[in-house]
Amino acid sequence: MKKLPIGIQTFSEIINEDYLYIDKTGIAYSLIDRFKYVFLSRPRRFGKSLFLDTLKNIFEGHRELFRGLLIEEQWNWEVKYPVIKISFSGGIHSKADLEEDLLYILKSNEKRLGLECENRARANYFFAELIEKAWEKYHQKVVILVDEYDKPILDNIENIPEALVIRDGMRDFYTKIKENDEYLRFVFLTGVSKFSKVSLFSGLNNLEDISLNPAFGNICGYTQFDLDTTFAPYLEGVDMEQVKRWYNGYNFLGDSVYNPFDILLFIKNDYEFDNYWFETGTPRFLVELIKKNSYFIPDLLNINVEKSLVNSFDIEHLNLESILFQTGYLTIKRLIRSGRGVRYELGFPNMEVQISFHEYILQSMISGSQKELIRNELLDLLEAGDAGGLEPVIKRLFASIAYNNYTNNDIERYEGFYASVLYAFFASFGVVIIAEGVSNKGRVDLTLQVGGRTFLFEFKVSDGEPLEQIKTMKYYEKYGGERYLIGIVFDPKARNVSRFEVERV
C-alpha cells in the first residue's frame, strides 16, 4: 500500500515519492476553466495548501506529475504560466515584521522566476513590478496563488488595534492585484476567514467566493466515497459507523466530508479514536470571547443564522458564531430556504469537535485532576442509572470552578451559567445531549440520553420548583424507557447547589 501523506503539502513530493493521493484535479480544472479571481475559505488542516500547490504545478505545465489523473487529458500542457506564490502559513506574523515578511516572499519569487526588479524597497511596488516583469519575460499572463492570506490578521486578533493596522496594510498590498488585471491569468486566495466591511476584499472586490458553492463543496477534505474506495485497504476491520460519528460531518454544501488530518492520523495510530485535528491548536481568544460575553454554551447545539453571518466577520465586532463556523468548530447541519432568503442551521460536525470543544471550555474553569475525577464519576453514575448519586458530584464540580470566573460580573445569578457548565461537562462525554429540548408543552433545560435512559434537568436560581415544573409540563412524555426527572436549585451566594430533587417515571 502507498504511504500516507501526513503533513505533506507539496504535490510533487506526494506524486514522486508514491504517497497516497485523492485526485482533486478534476475540481481544479473546473475551477480554472470557470473563474479568474477566486477565494476559498476552509478551516485549518483541510488541505488548502496542497490544493494550492497542485494548481501551481498545473499552471507551470508539469504534465509528468499528472499521469493518470483526471486533468491530464483536459489541460493544454504546452502553455506554461509564470506563477507568483505567496504563503503566510508558516510562523507568527506581527505588525513590525509584516513588511519584511512580504519583501522576503517577493524576493523568493523574484529569484525563482529569474527576474530583477528595481522597486524592492516597498512591498506594494515590488509586487506590482514583479507581476509586470513576469508577464514581459514569459510572454504569458501571470498566475497568483496566495495561501492563508488572513493569517497575519488572525495571529493578532487578540490585539484589535494591531490587527486593524495589519488588515489595512494587507488590503493595500492586495490592491495591486486588481490594478494589474491586464497581466493576470488566474488568482486564487485561500484562508480560514473572510473579513467583512472595510476589509481586504474592498481592495480586491472582484473575487468570486466559492467557499459555499455546492459545485466546489468537495474541493478539500475526504468524502465517504474516498474512504470506501481509496482508503478501503487501510481501514479493513474498522467500525466505519464509529469513524463517521467521530470524524465525518463537515458540510460546505457539497458532500459531507472528513478532515484529512483526522483520517491519516487515525490510521497511523492503529485506529485509536482521538481528537487529532482539535489538538493542533484552538485559538485562546475563542474561550475569552465566550467568557467575556457570558455566552450560553448550549445554544451552540442548534444555531439558526443568516447566510451573511457565516460568510464573513468584522474584526471590530467579533461574532462568535461566525468565528466558530469559519474555524471549523461549527458546520452547516441544514439549509433553510424561506421568503426572506437562505438561512443555515449550524451545529458541531462530529463527536471529535463536540467532545474536544467542551473539554477546552472546561479547562479554562477547572483544574485537570479534579475535572477528570468528576468526569469519570458522573459518567459512571449516568451509565448505572444512579441519578440520585449525581448530587454530591455536581456540588464538587461547582465548588472546583476557578474563582476568577465570577470576578467583576454577576454571572452566577443566571440559570444560563449553571446550564452552560453542566452542558459543557456532559457534552465532553460524547453522549446524546439536547439543550432546551422542545416538547408540545414547552422546553426543558437539558436532556441526556445514556445507556437507553433519559435524564431531564430543569434549573432554577435562588428559588422555584424545577422538579414540579418538569412534572406539570410533562416534558418527559416524548421519551420512552427509563426516565429520570432532576430539579436543581442553585444558590448564587454559595455558587453551588442548594436543592437537588430526583424522581423516576
Image (cartoon, rainbow, N blue to C red):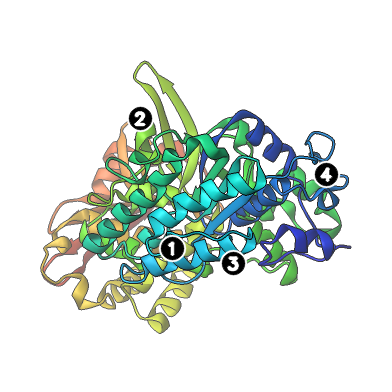
Identify the mark at residue 10; answer none if there is no mark.
none
The three-letter code of the residue at mark 2 reads Asn
User: Is residue 174 positioned above or below 263 on the image?
Assistant: above
Expressed as whole percent of the image width and height from the top left, the position of residue 162 reads 25, 63
The three-letter code of the residue at mark 4 reads Leu
Mark 3 → mark 2, Cα distance in angstroms: 40 Å
Q: Which residue is mark 3?
A: 276
Secondary structure beneath label 1 = loop
Q: Tell me if label 3 and label 2 are in contact, CB under 8 Å.
A: no
Q: Which residue is mark 4?
A: 69
Return the disc, 3 or 4, that comes first in the chain's sequence.
4
The residue most toward the bottom is 369
Task: Say few, some or many: other residues with alpha carbon within 10 Å of mark 3 (under 14 / 14 to 19 / 20 or more).
Answer: some
Q: Quadrant of residue 201?
A: top left
The three-letter code of the residue at mark 3 reads Tyr
What residue is shown at x 25% (from left), y 44% (from top)?
A: 469
Mark 1 → mark 4, Cα distance in angstroms: 40 Å
Secondary structure beneath label 3 = loop
The quarter in which the N terminus is drawn is bottom right
